Amino acid sequence: MKKLVLILAALVAVSAFADEYVQGYYRKNGTYVEGHHRTAPDGNPFNNYSTQGNVNPYTGQPGTVNPYLAPQPVYTPQPVYPSYPSFPRTPICGVTSTGQYICR
């Protein structure tokens, strides 16, 4: 009877994670990434295989990520471009010392 309860508890624990299989693929740099199982992305850090207290049922590895220490967003400064007036610039025209007529 205890074995049956343990088996049912294990099945419930495994099925609590909605997982999906990711097909293998090649990165832009040519590196091949093997196909693997992962928890479905849902923004919840507590139901991931890598979270402390959880165990990956496919590899048996315990989670190591602390769910309370959320990663901080990486700040990427954007380039600042000078602003130009939106109206068209009036050309400056004139005659050079050599007699050429030019506009700037």
Image (tube, grey):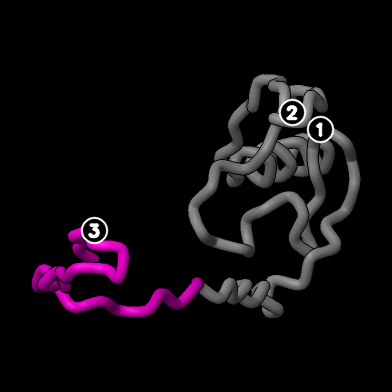
User: Main structural element of the magenta stretch: helix, strand or loop?
Assistant: loop
**Residue for point 59% across, 31% down:** 20
**Residue for point 51% across, 59% down:** 43
> Which of the pair 71/31 is nearer the observer?
31
Whether label 2 touches label 1, CB < 8 Å: yes
**Residue for point 67% across, 53% down:** 48
Say which quadrant the C terminus sits in.
Answer: bottom left
**Residue occupied by mark 3:** 100
Q: Look at the numbered disc 2 and give the secondary structure of its residue.
A: strand
Q: Is residue 58 above or below residue 84?
A: above
Q: Left or right: where does residue 98 sit relative to residue 70?
A: left
Q: Is residue 50 above or below residue 79?
A: above
Measured in 3D between alpha carbons, the distance from the residue under mark 1 to the one under mark 3, in whole angstroms, is: 81 Å
**Residue occupied by mark 2:** 36
Mark 2, mark 1: which one is toward the viewer?
Answer: 2
The magenta stretch is: 79-104
Mark 3 belongs to which amino acid? Answer: Gln
Please provide percent x and percent y for residue 52: 80, 65
**Residue occupied by mark 1:** 58
Question: How many residues crowd around disc 2 within 10 Å: few (fewer than 14), some, or many (20 or more)?
Answer: few
Q: Left or right: where does residue 73 sit relative to residue 85?
A: right
Q: Earlier in the sequence, mark 3 or mark 2?
A: 2
